[in-house]
Image (tube, grey):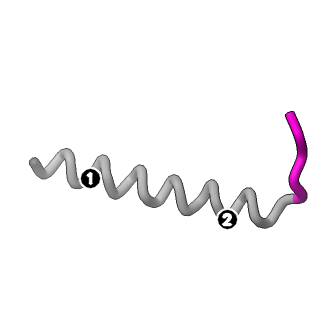
């Protein structure tokens, strides 16, 4: 459906943001 496309796009963009954020920060153990 059209909604599913939107959701997948948002998830993809979110993952890219997370990856960039993680790579731009020093790794820290929780």
Q: Which mark is residue 20?
A: 2
Q: Position of residue 1 (x, y in %)?
A: 9, 48
Q: N-terminal of the two: label 1 or label 2?
A: 1
Q: Residue at x 13, y 51 (%)?
A: 2
Across and down, in percent, residue 17 comes to 59, 59
Count neighbours of disc 1 (C-alpha within 10 A) and say few if under 14, some if 14 to 19, many if 20 or more. Answer: few
Task: Tell me if 8 is positioned left or right of 24 in this view.
Answer: left
Residue 1 among those drawn in magenta: no
Q: Quadrant of the C terminus?
A: top right
Q: Residues within 10 Å of mark 2 (few under 14, many from 20)?
A: few
Q: Which residue is mark 1?
A: 6
Quadrant of the rendered image containing residue 23: bottom right
- The answer to the question of whether label 1 and label 2 lie on touching residues, with beta carbons closer than 8 A, is no
Task: Say which residue appears at 20% left-offset and 46% top-offset.
Answer: 4
For this orientation, the residue located farthest to the left is 1
Instruction: Give the image location of residue 16, x and y in percent.
Output: 55, 62
Q: Is disc 1 placed on a helix, strand or loop?
A: helix
Q: Residue furthest top?
A: 30
Residue located at (87% from left, 53% from top): 27
Helix or strand or loop: what does disc 2 sit on?
helix
Most common SS among magenta residues: loop
Q: CA distance from mark 1 to mark 2?
A: 21 Å
Chain part drawn in magenta: 26-30
Q: Which callout, 1 or 2, points to the residue nearer the camera?
A: 2
The answer to whether residue 1 is left or right of residue 3 is left
């Amino acid at each position: 459906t059209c909604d599913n496309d939107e959701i997948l796009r948002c998830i993809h963009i979110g993952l890219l943001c997370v990856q960039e954020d993680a790579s731009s920060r020093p790794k820290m153990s929780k």
